Amino acid sequence: MKKTSVPTETYYSTNLSSDLFRLTPLLPVSLENALGFDAATILKQVEPETKSLILDCRKMGSYDSYFVIFYAALEKFCLANNIQFSAEGVTVDMKEFLRLFGSKNDLKTEIKKQSFFVNYLNQIGNHTINILKDTRDFIEFIGELILKMLNLIVNPTQIRWRDFPLHFTKAGVNALPIVLLIVFLIGVISGYQGAALLSQVGAEIYIADAVGISITRELGPLMTAILIAGRSGSAFTAEIGTMKVSEEIDALNTMGFDHIKFLVLPRVFAVMIAMPILTLMADLAGILGGLLTAITALDLTITGYLNQLQSTLSYWDVFTGVGKSIFFGFLVAAVGCFRGLQVRGGAESVGKFTTTSVVTSILLIIIADAVFTFVFQTLGI
Amino acid sequence: MEQKPIIQLKNVTVKYGDRTILDNVTTDIMPGEIFVIVGGSGCGKSVLLRQIIGLEQPAEGQVIIDGQDFGATTGEARRQILRKFGVMFQSNGLFASMTLAENIELVLEEYTHLNSSERDEVIEMNLRSVGLGGFRNFTPAEVSGGMRKRAALARAMALNPSILCFDEPSSGLDPVTAASLDKLIKNLNSVLGATMIVVTHDLESIMSISDRILMLDTKVKGILATGTAEELKNYTKDPNVFNFFNRIA
Ligand SMILES: Nc1ncnc2c1ncn2[C@@H]1O[C@H](COP(=O)(O)OP(=O)(O)OP(=O)(O)O)[C@@H](O)[C@H]1O
Ligand SMILES: [Mg+2]
């Protein structure tokens, strides 16, 4: 924006006699004219011997919220310099306006001015505290969840199984096409990566080992979990968050329902059961992807690939992958519901927590996977 | 005739973080009365209601329902207290994924031993009583705001609770619908004999339905005044009360 210097006379007139300063705005004291009514500039004209300042409001016509700011600035200056401040020609409406906008109520938030550095440190501190709190809350939530899941062994009718098929369909069946496609492509891609290397040493047939093991042990469960985090974890957060905002959860609780049993557990079970099934199918798709590469890029035969696969791939490889996937499923659903229950306030909060939900799930999945890999390594499984 | 209060608030103090919202609120609510909670926006009306219906536990003090300390009960005892309540929330709290009928059926299933056809009858009856006879298979999204409010009322009444709570029943309604809702509340009160706790801003409805009024205030963080509508209209001890009830800005 261009800052034009404006001739002051058009905005106001001043009249300075020995100890009296009279300021008469001639144009509306409004946001639009703020430049012309810069209090600091005007007050420069006040002499040290000035005893009183009069703001004459008779000629200014209209005004808006800037008038309140301007008025307050004059008032403050006069108070600080021991000058008597008064305003003339203030209408009843103006007074009401000043009172409404200018009233210094006791609830006014203090705006602290701090150096950038202190602010920065403060933010880091606050952030750390929030993360720690969040972690503690999540661990508490997981604890409650596990307790209530164990409780079900004694009393399996306590949760709302009626919603289970719906959640299973949404989280499992509907996710199948995308999961199959993605893991199939991952199989193709990792096949090509391996092919380039293996053909250099004339060990083309080991493509079956490379693809088979990496898909069943790692990529199958991992990719499935990440996809489910994006599809179902986020959906859980949004659904439960919306219910939170519209007081549906409160309503549930006052009706004597436990929202964990009613909303969370059916979702957790749906994902925990869907995940291993999806992972098994994803393993198959990935292996087929590898097969495609083997016959197109490496001129292997289908039987050759499958025979090799059969001789290297053990049940255990598939087992660990599927086992992990159940745990990933638990994590995704738990995080999704946890974030949903954290929603406070309005709709924008739902969006925020949905994003956090996906990020948290994926982070936890990867961390868990790293731990699994480490443990399996050490145990030599 | 000395009656025992159905709800007693004893020195209820509510804090969120360091912020005290309500400080030392003590009052009794008598069975069968229409008890109205008023006060400016943000003074803690909804918060007080949440303490009464057991959604939150006060930082200090007790909420006593029918002689039982609500906060100290667990399990079945708590369930029995919750069953006494019917609540209509500020944003109605209907389950969006269910039809109006299913919304009501849920509570009936949980607390009664009615069979499916009996439940159906009760649902139909409840919906008809709030003028929603033909709408049982509509979801909340498919009906208007006023109809949602009434559906929420039907759900709150489903178990014939002895305490019905309303958080701003008439907010967002046109004056005619609001007035008819007031009439409905008044009717239900005389028919069911239930205790009603109504949070509202609406002066007209306060005047027409209230037996007793509790006025909260942000500055005192608690009760500014209590009394009947007539009493508060002539309340001269505090200009805020007088102005509120005589509609002076
Ligand atoms: N969960 C919460 N966490 C923190 N502060 C809260 C919470 N709930 C309410 N508050 C605060 O408590 C105060 C009272 O809120 P409350 O919802 O009771 O207002 P109200 O009297 O019902 O107002 P309205 O008429 O606008 O509904 C508000 O200042 C609000 O910021
Ligand atoms: Mg409220």
Image (cartoon, rainbow, N blue to C red):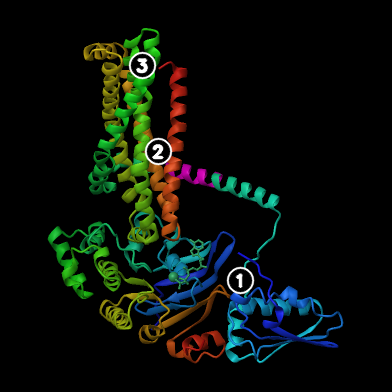
Q: Is residue A136 magenta?
A: yes
* Residue where numbered disc 2 is placed: A331
Residue furthest to the left in view is B117
* Mark 3 vs mark 2, CA separation in Å: 35 Å
Residue A121 appears at what percent x and percent y?
Answer: 66, 48
* Mark 1 vs mark 3, CA separation in Å: 70 Å
Looking at the rendering, the stretch of residues picked out in magenta corresponds to A132-144
Tag in front: 3 or 2: 3
Residue B36 appears at what percent x and percent y?
Answer: 41, 79
Q: Residue at x 67, y 76 (%)?
A: A36
Can residue A143 be seen here? The reply is: no
Instruction: Check the residue under mark 1 and report the chain it is in.
Output: A
Q: Nearer the viewer, residue A313 or B42?
A: A313
Label whose residue precedes the other's in the sequence (1 or 3)? 1
* Residue where numbered disc 1 is placed: A107
Q: Is residue A85 left or right of residue A139?
A: right
Instruction: Name the amino acid, label 2.
Output: Leu
Instruction: Check the residue under mark 2 and report the chain it is in.
Output: A
Q: Is residue B213 above or below residue A266?
A: below
* Residue where numbered disc 3 is placed: A195
Whether discs 3 and 2 lie on one chain: the answer is yes
Q: Please, what secondary structure does the residue beneath circle 2 have?
A: helix
Q: Quadrant of residue A50?
A: bottom right
